[in-house]
Amino acid sequence: MSEFFVILLLVILVYQSWYQARHLFQRRYIERFTFPPAIKNKLKRRYPKLSDRQLDLIFRGLRDYFLLCHQSPLKMVAMPSQAVDSAWHEFILFTRYYQHFCRKALGRFLHHTPAEAMRSPTHAQVGIQRAWRLACYQERLDPKHPTRLPLLFALDKLLEIDNGFYYSLNCRKSASSRPHYCAGDIGCSSGCAGDSGGESGDDSSGDTSGCGGDSGGGCGGD
């Protein structure tokens, strides 16, 4: 083996070690990050009926969302919870904290993209599928045959958030008169063509998740 290839191999090994260490640091930073207390006070005014424990659950959901974005740095991950989206928006208003967090946790600025700014219903759908799959994997659930909803998809219904997105594993059997999104269909458990929950990035999946044009995603990070 020539000296050039030995050096090249060493460079690759060093880069891999650096990348893995950076990835682990970022994940641990997200897991241990303390959100500014003032955000919780603002969220309390927005949702006065929620207890401190319930508000903490929203911030747990926000932490989970940032972990999903960390796992998928190059592709949009849609936000499936209105309550968590509200916490995210309040966090962004603390500009310096948010910029510092993004730099340390993600290595980039994570923009907040409202639902009305989505390019098309199909784009939102792909983002929701990605959020579903990553959230399931994060909580060790089978995305195609989950036994429960991941936290991000369960929160709005659990906390009874007004105008929130309510998901059910099988919304066709839901006794509630309120519209529910078919979370089971997002994972293609009802039989999508191919594995549309994958990272293929093929926006041609259209409405095959069964949730229609309104995919239930409030917003997503880019």
Image: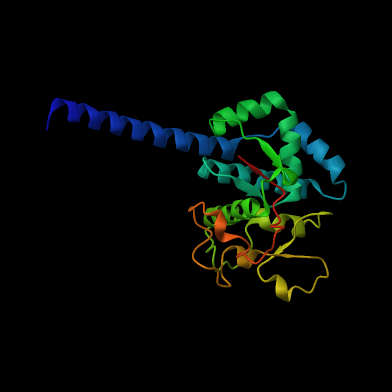
Quadrant of the drawing holding the N terminus: top left
The front one of 79 and 213 is 213
**Left or right of 9, for residue 17:** right
The front one of 153 and 73 is 73
Quadrant of the drawing holding the C terminus: top right
Image quadrant of residue 168? bottom right
Residue 10 image point, x, y percent: 25, 30
Q: Residue furthest left?
A: 1
Residue at image x 72%, y 57%? 214
Residue 169 image point, x, y percent: 65, 68
The front one of 215 and 141 is 215
Residue at image x 57%, y 64%? 187
Is residue 53 in view from this perspective? no
Residue 195 image point, x, y percent: 50, 63
**Left or right of 199, for residue 15:** left
Residue 82 image point, x, y percent: 75, 49
Q: Is residue 135 above or below residue 33?
A: below
**Left or right of 144, for residue 15:** left
Image quadrant of residue 98? top right
Residue at image x 58%, y 72%? 190
